[in-house]
Image: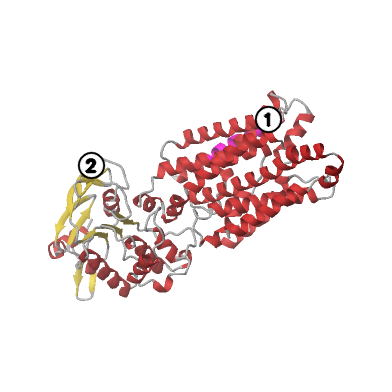
Amino acid sequence: MRTGLALLCAVLALASLALGPVDLAALWARDPELARNLFIELRLPRTVLALLIGAGLGASGAAAQALFRNPLASPDLLGPSSGAALGAVLAGYFLGAGVIGMAIGGLAGAGLSLLLLLALAGRGAGATRLVLAGVAVSMMLGVAINLALSLAPSPFALYDLMFWLMGSLNDRSLPQLALAAPLILIGIVLLLRAAPALDTLALGEEVAQSLGVGLSAVQARVVLAIALATGAGVAVAGSIGFIGLIVPHLVRPFVRHRPGAAIAPSALAGAALLSAADIAVRLLPAGLDLRLGVLTALIGAPFFLCLIMGRR
Amino acid sequence: MLEAIDLARPPMLAPTSLTLHPGQLTGVIGPNGAGKTTLLKALAGLSRGPGTVRLDGHPFLPHPQRLAWLPASRDAVWPIPAAALVQLGLGPAAAPDPAAVSAALSACDATALAHRPVAQLSTGERARVLLARAIAARPAWLLLDEPIANLDPGHRLDVMALLASEAARGAGVVLALHDLDLARRCDRLLLIANGAVIADGPPHMVLNTDQLGRVFGVQHGPDGWVRCSRFDH
């Protein structure tokens, strides 16, 4: 399955590189320099960001569900996504809506929300306490985002920030890629390394402990990795919901439902899904400007509903 | 040798010192809420509190081949096939070992369940698969919380025989149970009431009429177990 998903990612990446308002091949004939710049500074970051952010969300979702032993858990539950969004919005106010400033603000917000989460949950907290603390942090940060928006200096700023929050990969640049990529990659690697322990956690926390899994260490590492992989994504692309929730459910049947083994294929499937969604928003007719985060939610919400109905 | 030295978990378990021996089937009996699970979990190193547990004279470190813990809960969140679940019992870093997995499943009469998702099994079937998970790594110690609860009479006998054979291969087996008839098959019984071990010895010593009447409020009559006539609170 992994090979198939990797191939799918490669095909979608090529399609994403080839797709855009300008015909690169024609432009190359007329102005190779411009075509090269356009390719490297616009198409490439957008394509790579879609793959990386999707992979980070997919892996984080699989890891969150494994850690909390709950198929309805998602990385958003822990707060770093909201933290990143709040940080980016505040940076947008105080530093002007420069994209790099917002990305740095987003990263700071994700980091602070992680510290807040760990402070609230306490050391060596069980998964239940961690998820309750995460929900509390997310709610507080959500309210803070609304407060920040309602205090927007001008209607234009409000409009810009609202639009930014909806999530998009339009016009992302190489510096944004350089900022987010290492953090997302570190997060994914940490999650992949925690996969065997998360598999064992399927047997319950006590049994996993008796089999030699250091529970607090695994929890701390996984929470940090989720904060890195999702926070860095939100910091450059805004909120993109539902990928982390859905993707693990799509791949888990192929790994005999082992929650840890689902992390690697979830990363690949997340990368493919977000790339496909980002291609889809670009293929829509020019008048219909559907944001990427809105599209993923439009697909994700009905799927989530089916999931809940199926479990009854 | 599994030693508990002044092991206590207030308010559930009063300070307890005991030595458990490998090759023995040790039963832990006592009324609901007496502290059986608390004692087993403390012995398995799964709770913190006063006292120490020593395994062969050393402080206890968890390892799949050292000690297996089977909780009383039969929860299964993920619909993992039984064989894959038993494989997980070999430890987080273990290589796939289909031989060990099928041996464990077969020992628990769960071979036919190997490919069925555990979340869809009946409680008794799941209990057998989870027991297979616990014995798969052939651990030196098996600490089992009510392994025969939820099982039908035939499988109760099978599991008691399996545990006796695990003890015969040299494992130390400690199990909590409520079946006073099957408890007679243990080599040693610990009777727990109100968080303290009040009797410790071979079954015929521990399961005397007086003691059972006092602790459980039951006695054995011509029609099987009945509520004790002397039973009063």
Label for residue B72?
A: none
Relative vertical location of residue A96 with respect to residue B215 in this rendering, above or below: above
The answer for which chain carries disc 2 is B
**Residue B16: x, y in percent?**
19, 47
Label for residue B51?
A: 2
Q: Is residue B220 left or right of residue A52?
A: left
Are discs 1 and 2 located on one and the same chain? no
Label for residue A100?
A: 1
Which element is circle 1 on? helix
Q: Pick whichever, A64 or A268, lies toward us.
A: A268
Does the segment drawn in magenta span residue A42? Answer: no
Relative vertical location of residue B110 with respect to residue A166 in this rendering, above or below: below
Density class for disc 1 (Cα within 10 Å; few <14, some 14-19, many ≥20) is some
* Residue type of the residue flagged with mark 2: Gly
Give the residues in magenta. Answer: A134-149
Relative vertical location of residue B133 with respect to residue A177 in this rendering, above or below: below
**Residue B218: x, y in percent?**
22, 65
Q: Residue at x 79, y 30 (%)?
A: A156
* Residue type of the residue flagged with mark 1: Ile
The answer for which chain carries disc 1 is A
